[in-house]
């Protein structure tokens, strides 16, 4: 794999579990990493540069590396700037997934969003997705750790008006502690060529709620430093 320009995030909780967290901004690199990770499901097109390019400063990704230098987890986020639209319209037009739906979407692709609050989400909407934790590490609290860190990075980069995600119902039932609100009908989604068919809930925070959350956790905010684990930035994806 080509060498990466990466930033290492230090978090005590992840370090105690033997996980090193790396922050990156080049989604070509991210897709190369995730495609080489055999147990991870394919990344949705809204984080794939061949379908939905992300401008510099409008997206980032986090991956976790275990003590064997193998990929243990991933997460990604991007900013949707919607001054004249809203998140529901952005989903239903398929522009949330494809920069050019007329070119890349299948004729039978569709996304229905009936969550009422999605129509109120305008302005800077930060979308968090592609959260994945390797099966042997699930239930260890890593998903909560990476979500907390992602919220901190999203706030630092964008101070968004809203921060949201689309998640399966079972995750809402299990609990999504870093999101204050949730509604069904966030995305009844079918992307034929991507083999995606889901019925996800919308979970979200307002910008003020995100700011308050960051303030509460400021004393454990992850330290950011240039990666020193490997000066080449080489990652072994297994």
Image (tube, rainbow, N blue to C red):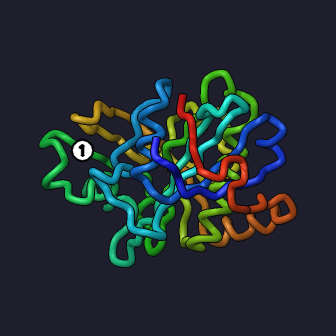
Residue that appears at 31% across and 56% down: 52
Q: Single out the residue that lies furthest toward the front.
A: 232
In the picture shown, does residue 195 fall above or below 3? above
Q: Single out the residue that lies furthest toward the top.
A: 136
Q: Single out the residue that lies furthest toward the bottom.
A: 83
Residue 161 position, x and y percent, is 54, 72
State the quadrant of the C terminus. top right
Residue that appears at 31% across and 47% down: 112
Q: From where the camera sits, is residue 117 visible?
A: no
Residue that appears at 67% across and 47% down: 230
Q: From where the camera sits, is residue 17 visible?
A: yes
In the picture shown, does residue 68 fall above or below 33? above
In the picture shown, does residue 234 fall above or below 132? below
* Nearest the eye: 27 or 169: 27
Examine the image and state in which quarter residue 139 appears.
top right
Q: Quick one: label 1, few (<14), some, or many (20+) residues within 10 Å?
A: some
* Nearest the eye: 233 or 222: 233
Residue 144 position, x and y percent, is 70, 43
Q: Secondary structure at mark 1?
A: strand
Examine the image and state in which quarter residue 26 appears.
bottom left
Residue 166 position, x and y percent, is 48, 46
Examine the image and state in which quarter residue 106 appears.
top left
- Which residue corresponds to mark 1? 110
Residue that appears at 60% across and 28% down: 134
* Nearest the eye: 76 or 187: 76
Residue 174 position, x and y percent, is 66, 33
In the picture shown, does residue 28 fall above or below 213? above
């Amino acid at each position: 794999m080509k060498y990466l320009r990466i930033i290492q995030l230090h978090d005590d909780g992840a370090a105690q579990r033997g996980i090193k967290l790396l922050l990156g901004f080049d989604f070509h690199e991210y897709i190369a990493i995730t495609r080489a990770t055999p147990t991870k499901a394919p990344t949705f097109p809204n984080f794939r540069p061949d379908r939905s390019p992300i401008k510099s400063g409008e997206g980032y990704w986090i991956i976790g590396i275990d003590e064997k230098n193998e990929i243990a987890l991933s997460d990604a986020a991007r900013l949707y700037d919607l001054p004249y639209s809203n998140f529901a319209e952005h989903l239903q037009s398929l522009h949330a997934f494809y920069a050019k739906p007329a070119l890349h979407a299948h004729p039978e692709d569709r996304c229905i969003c009936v969550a009422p609050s999605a129509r109120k989400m305008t302005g800077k909407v930060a979308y968090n997705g592609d959260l994945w934790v390797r099966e042997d590490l699930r239930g260890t609290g890593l998903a909560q750790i990476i979500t907390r860190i992602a919220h901190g990075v999203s706030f630092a980069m964008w101070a968004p008006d809203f921060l949201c995600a689309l998640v399966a119902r079972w995750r809402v039932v299990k609990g999504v502690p870093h999101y204050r609100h949730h509604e069904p009908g966030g995305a009844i989604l079918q992307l034929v060529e991507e083999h995606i068919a889901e019925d996800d809930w919308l979970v979200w925070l307002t910008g003020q709620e995100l700011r308050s959350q960051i303030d509460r956790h400021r004393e454990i905010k992850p330290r950011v430093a240039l990666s020193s684990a490997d000066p080449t930035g080489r990652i072994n994806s297994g």
